[in-house]
């Protein structure tokens, strides 16, 4: 305490109490779980059971514990900003400003919002009762669910692990975090720092691929956060239904923009283009395609050209100005859309440059794309509009 402000940092001391502390994760053939300081390994099943035991002890329920975890996360962000930023920036060559905006700002705001509102969220809320219940009184008490599973995603590997984690910890839950294996450097950094700052009796990071995710889904959790594709979302939902587990699914899809003559074309064009610039369109809230009335076609086309040259004054996007794509398979999928027959794909208004070897495609706008085009069959999830 100093300067009129209180600062709390969670210092792990469970090694004296229990003889071990979580120091890492080992995932491989015949070895999937959490490695302990004494050399032993907790399997996924044992890890979930340990967290459930912690939850049943009611350790995570008090306000002080929740506050300490949130403040520890905030301290973690401050202490390790450069290493966290580098782990994301090198993964898909994200510009540092973009990392700051889409990862750090969002995470810090989520933590500060939870700290500011935590006491009010935990307070019972009185509600009125029917005459049948007279003279009773009633109130709603928000209770933690139990053990929560968070599936992170590769496109925002810090944000989509940390923000659901903030929510789960603020609610007083124990948490298992499974980062995306498609962002391995970020995944390792997430594990390294979360295990250093958070209470290991109530928290675990488990890395791995689809086989590990499948094994996790066999466990009984009390809530699951998942961000990703509709296909995998259905798998998660089906597995959760077998356990009657509630879920939060944040999925993609083909998000259209509608543009007519009443639009502010300059603003519209910049917003459409920005959605394909940020993270190279690998973001589910970017407009996937635009439905434009005939009277708005030419004004929007001209505004998109102006916006493109405003974004990229050299006349075209450079490889160091935009995020690269996650891997070769995703690049090839998008190049199949880009290189489709022009009669179906449509005319390229602006953009079109690419470098397959470095998994990079410039933000590209097409005009008069046919409904049967590859781009219209599935979510694009890339810098094509």
Image (spheres, helix red, strand yellow):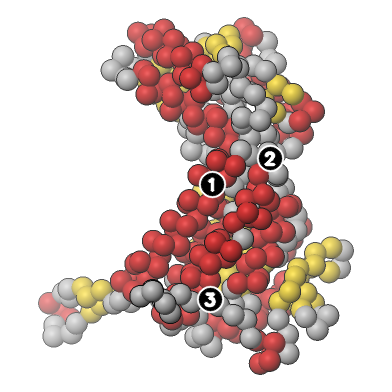
Is 216 left, or right, of 380 in this rendering?
Answer: right
- In which image quadrant can residue 38 be found? bottom right
Q: Quadrant of the N terminus?
A: bottom left
Q: Residue drawn 54% across and 46% down?
A: 100
* Residue mark closest to the camera, 3 vs 2: 3
Q: Earlier in the sequence, mark 2 or mark 1?
A: 2
Residue 76 locus on image (x, y percent):
57, 65
Q: Residue drawn 78% across and 80% down?
A: 37
Q: Earlier in the sequence, mark 3 or mark 2?
A: 3
Q: Residue drawn 72% across and 59% down?
A: 188
Q: Which residue is mark 2?
A: 92
Q: Which residue is mark 3?
A: 9
Residue 235 locus on image (x, y percent):
63, 52
Q: Earlier in the sequence, mark 1 or mark 3?
A: 3
Callout 2: few (<14), some (14-19), or many (20+) C-alpha neighbours within 10 Å?
many
Residue 125 locus on image (x, y percent):
25, 74
Relative height, residue 272 to residue 225 (above, below) = above
Checking the image for residue 100, the label placed there is 1
Q: Secondary structure at mark 2?
A: loop
- In which image quadrant can residue 176 be found? bottom right
Q: How many marks?
A: 3
């Amino acid at each position: 305490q100093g300067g009129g402000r209180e600062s709390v940092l969670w210092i792990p001391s469970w090694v004296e109490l229990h003889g071990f502390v979580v120091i890492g994760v080992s995932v491989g053939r015949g070895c999937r779980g959490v490695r302990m300081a004494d050399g032993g390994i907790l399997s996924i099943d044992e890890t979930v059971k340990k967290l459930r035991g912690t939850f049943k002890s009611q350790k995570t329920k008090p306000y002080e514990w929740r506050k300490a975890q949130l403040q520890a996360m905030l301290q973690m962000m401050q202490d390790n900003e450069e290493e966290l930023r580098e782990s994301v920036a090198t993964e898909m060559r994200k510009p540092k400003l973009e990392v700051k905006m889409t990862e750090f700002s969002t995470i810090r705001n989520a933590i500060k919002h939870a700290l500011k509102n935590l006491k009010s969220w935990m307070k019972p809320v009185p509600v009125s009762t029917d005459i049948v219940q007279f003279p009773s009184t009633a109130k709603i008490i928000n209770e933690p669910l139990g053990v929560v599973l968070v599936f992170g995603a590769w496109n925002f590997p810090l944000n989509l692990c940390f923000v659901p984690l903030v929510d789960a910890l603020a609610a007083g839950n124990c948490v298992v975090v499974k980062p995306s294996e498609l962002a391995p450097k970020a995944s390792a950094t997430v594990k390294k720092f979360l295990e250093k700052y958070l209470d290991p009796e109530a928290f675990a990071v488990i890395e791995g691929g689809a086989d590990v995710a499948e094994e996790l889904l066999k466990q009984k959790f009390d809530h699951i956060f998942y961000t990703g594709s509709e296909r995998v979302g259905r798998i998660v939902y089906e597995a959760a239904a077998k356990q009657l587990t509630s879920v939060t699914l944040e999925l993609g899809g083909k998000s259209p923009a509608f543009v007519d003559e009443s639009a502010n074309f300059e603003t519209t064009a910049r917003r459409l283009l920005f959605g394909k610039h940020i993270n190279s369109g690998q973001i589910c809230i970017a407009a996937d395609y635009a439905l434009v009335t005939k009277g708005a076609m030419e004004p929007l086309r001209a505004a998109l050209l102006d916006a493109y040259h405003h974004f990229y004054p050299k006349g075209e996007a450079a490889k160091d100005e935009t995020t690269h794509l996650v891997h070769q398979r995703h690049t090839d999928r998008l190049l199949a859309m880009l290189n489709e027959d022009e009669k179906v794909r449509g005319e390229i208004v602006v953009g079109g440059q690419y470098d397959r070897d470095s998994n990079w495609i410039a933000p590209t706008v097409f005009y008069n794309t046919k409904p049967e085009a590859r781009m219209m069959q599935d979510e694009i999830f890339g810098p094509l509009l």
